[in-house]
Amino acid sequence: MLRDMFRLRLAKTSPYPMELEVSRASGSRIYDHLDRPYLDFISGIAVSIVGHRHPRVLEAVRDQLDRYWHTMVYGEHIQAPQVRLASLLAGFLGPSFEQVYLVNSGAEAIEGAMKLVKKVTGRRRLVSFRKAYHGGTHGALSLLGDETYKGPFRPLLPETFLLDYNDPQGLEFLDERVAGVFVESVQAEAGAVPADAVWFRALAQRCKEQGIALVVDEVQTGLGRCGTWFAYQAYGVEPDVVVMAKGLGGGLPIGAFAASAAWMQHLATNPMLGHLTTFGGNPVCAAGASAVLEVIRDENLITKSLQSGEIIRERVAFWSKQAGSALELSGKGLLLALNMGSGAKVQAMMQKCWSSGLLVDWFLFNEGCIRLAPPLNIAEEDLHLAMDLLHKAWKET
Ligand SMILES: Cc1ncc(COP(=O)(O)O)c(C=O)c1O
C-alpha cells in the first residue's frame, strides 16, 4: 500500500529506486516495515556520520524543539545554536576561517561560495574538475564534471571550465581571469579518488600566485570521514573557502561555507543582502549539528574511523590473497570504493548485499566500484559482520 502510494505520488530521481520501506533507524542499522535490520554501509551518502539517532544529538534536538524552531530569516536574530555551531567549526577549521555562512544543503553552500569568490575577486571564471559532483542546482550543475548529467539542462552558467583532476598540466589554465577553483580533496563520485598531494599543493600554490580563490568542497569528505576534520587538512594546503553539508547535521538538513571575516563581509555590503536564505542554519538543525561535532570530538571518532578503515583494508587484502586476485580499494578513512571491475558486477553484488541485510551503494561516475561509507562510530563487531556479508556476496558474484 505504502509502496504503491510511493510509486504514485512521489517524483523520482531514477527509474530504479531502492524502495526500502523504512520503519525506524538506530545506530548503524535501518529497519524495514517487517522490522528486518539492515547494516548501513552508506550512511545516507555520508550523512549519518554518528549513526542514526545518536542519543546526544537527539537530546540536543529535543531541547531546541522545546525552545524555538524558527524566528527570522538567517542572519537577523541572535540564535544560540547558530553561534555555538559557528564557534565549534571555527575551532576545527583554524584561524583563517573566522566566519561561516549557514545554509540548508551542499548545493546551496556551493552556490554561496560561487557568489562569494566572484564578488571578492571581481572576476567571472569558475573552474572545477572532470568527474566532480557539487550539487543539482543550476550553479552547482555548471561545475559538474560530466556532460551526461549537464547537457539536457543547458544553458548553464557561462565562463565555467573543467580541468582534469590530479593532472598538473591543466594548472597553466589558471590565470588572472579565474575567480575560483572548486575542488574535492577526495573526489567522491569518481570512486573515492584522493587528490595527489604534489598536485594539490601545486594547485593551491598556483591559485595563490594568480589571486584565485581556492574553494574546497568537503560536503562528502568533511567532518572526520577521511581521517582529519576536513580532508584537505591532511595535505598541508590552505584553502580560502571550505564548503560542507551532509554529515554536518548527522541527518538534519544543514550546510555551510566558511571563509575569513573580510571575505564574508562582501555578501553583506554593496549591495547589502547579497546572499539570503530563509531557513539556513535552522536552530533545530544547528543544535543537532553542534551535538554531532561534539560527539565526533568527545568519542574520538576520527581515530576510531581510521581504525575501522584499516580493518576494512585488511579484510579486503585477505580476501584478495585467498582468491589470488588483486582487489582494489581506494579512498581514505571511511569513504572507500571497492573496485569490482564492471557495473554489472556492482549491481549484482549490491542486490546480494541488500537481500542479506547490508546496504552498500555505487558511485555516480564510477559504475565499477562499490561505495563503502558506514557511520564513523560503527561498532567493531558490526564492521566484521558487514565485511562477512560483503565477502559472501563477492564470492557469489
Ligand atoms: C562533494 C559534494 N558536493 C556537493 C554536494 C551537494 O550536496 P546536496 O545534495 O546536499 O545539495 C554533494 C552531494 O552529494 C557532494 O557529494
Image (tube, rainbow, N blue to C red):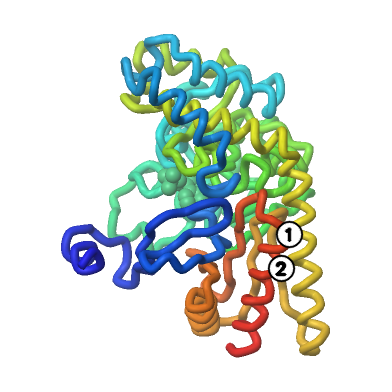
Label 2 belongs to which residue? 384
Q: Are marks 1 and 2 in contact (CB under 8 Å)?
A: yes
Residue shown at 44% from the left, 23% from the top: 64
- Return the residue nearer the eye: 86 or 366: 86
In the depicted structure, whether residue 70 falls above or below residue 200: above
Q: Is residue 177 left or right of residue 208?
A: left
Q: Position of residue 177 (x, y in %)?
A: 52, 34
Q: Is residue 263 visible?
A: yes
Residue shown at 69% from the left, 56% from the top: 379
Toward the front, the furthest residue is 35
In the depicted structure, whether residue 251 falls above or below residue 6: above
Q: Position of residue 371 (x, y in %)?
A: 58, 65
Q: Position of residue 54 (x, y in %)?
A: 56, 42
Which three-letter amino acid code belongs to the residue tagged 1? Glu
At label 2, counting other C-alpha atoms closer than 10 Å, the crowd grade (few under 14, some 14-19, many 20 or more) is some
Which three-letter amino acid code belongs to the residue tagged 2? His
Residue shown at 53% from the left, 23% from the top: 100
Q: Is residue 123 visible?
A: no
Q: Is residue 143 left or right of residue 29?
A: left
- Return the residue nearer the eye: 321 or 96: 321
Where disc 2 sits, the SS reads: helix
Q: Which mark is residue 380?
A: 1
- Return the residue nearer the eye: 173 or 384: 384
